[in-house]
Amino acid sequence: MKTPDNLNQIDALLEIMAQLRNPDGGCPWDLEQNFATIAPYTIEEAYEVADAIELGDMGELRDELGDLLLQVVFHAQMAKEANEFRFEDVVRAICEKMIRRHPHVFGDETARSAGTVKGRWEEIKAEERAAKGKATKQSLLDDVPLNLPALTRALKLQSRAASVGFDWPSTANVLDKLNEEMLELSHELAKGGDKDRLEDEFGDILFVYANLARHLKIDPEAALRRTNAKFRRRFGRIEEKLDAQGRTLTQSNLDEMDAMWNEAKREERE
């Protein structure tokens, strides 16, 4: 068996994965895995890529992209073992898809004209679904993945609907809808609404917030990650301040911690 040093970098990675999955001397943990058990790691690695981008750490981004690439190789190796497809087939398929979906870049002069670009993406995807034997009457929203984070999926559902004109004409309309949904939640609370009704109304509010983010051209997941990091940072300052006084969180109270929180905000602004 070849060693990685004898191969180019992609072939080296494929060979490493094959050795890890080799029943004769491979890694016991890797050999136990299947598509379902590896899927959560694939999702986790994608989030770690996003974290590296959020931090602006290019060295970390390089490493995390490598981890994500390994996930692709892992799935491809298992598919190869099942005689389903190989890594090369994955690469070939995405190359063909990118060329097919960008006729304005890779096509003839007619396809390259600006007027033919708008609207072609969905038409091409519909052609692809038909070629796969899927019903031509499939919903516009059917291929938005179910396992996306809820806010991201809301954004994609709304964007897809907006592509055919089902959209609020302005941000002001979205804000009006948000106020309407807030009032509905308030009414449910006043009635002592049960958990199911409250969850339904709260979900409506989050969905409108996702729509507002889309109109503002903001990624709601990125915005919330940023706020999470801010909360973690400021709460950490409370812990530091109390630790400097020789005290713990349980030895403080809400008013005192709130004052320290506001002090942490002032420190950041300064």
Image (cartoon, rainbow, N blue to C red):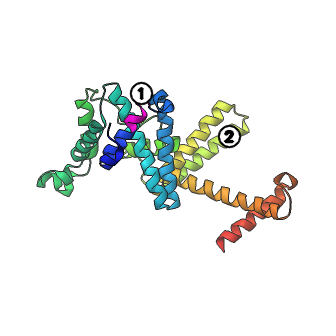
In the image, residue 146 above or below residue 226: above
* In the image: residue 208, left or right of residue 262: left
For the residues bearing labels 1 and 2, Cβ distance under 8 angstroms: no
> Which residue is drawn at the image coordinates 62% and 53% (left, top)?
228
Amino acid type, callout 1: Asp
Residue 5: give x, y in percent of width and height: 34, 48
Q: Nearer the viewer, residue 219 or 73?
A: 73
> Which residue is drawn at the image coordinates 52% and 53% (left, top)?
51
> Which residue is drawn at the image coordinates 80% and 59% (left, top)?
257
User: Which image quadrant for residue 201?
Assistant: top right
Per the rendering, the mark at residue 187 is: 2
The question of residue 14 being in magenta is answered with no
Mark 1 element type: loop
Which span of residues is magenta-colored? 17-25
Res 39 seen here:
yes
Q: Nearer the viewer, residue 263 or 31?
A: 31
Q: Which residue is mark 1?
A: 24
Mark 2 element type: helix
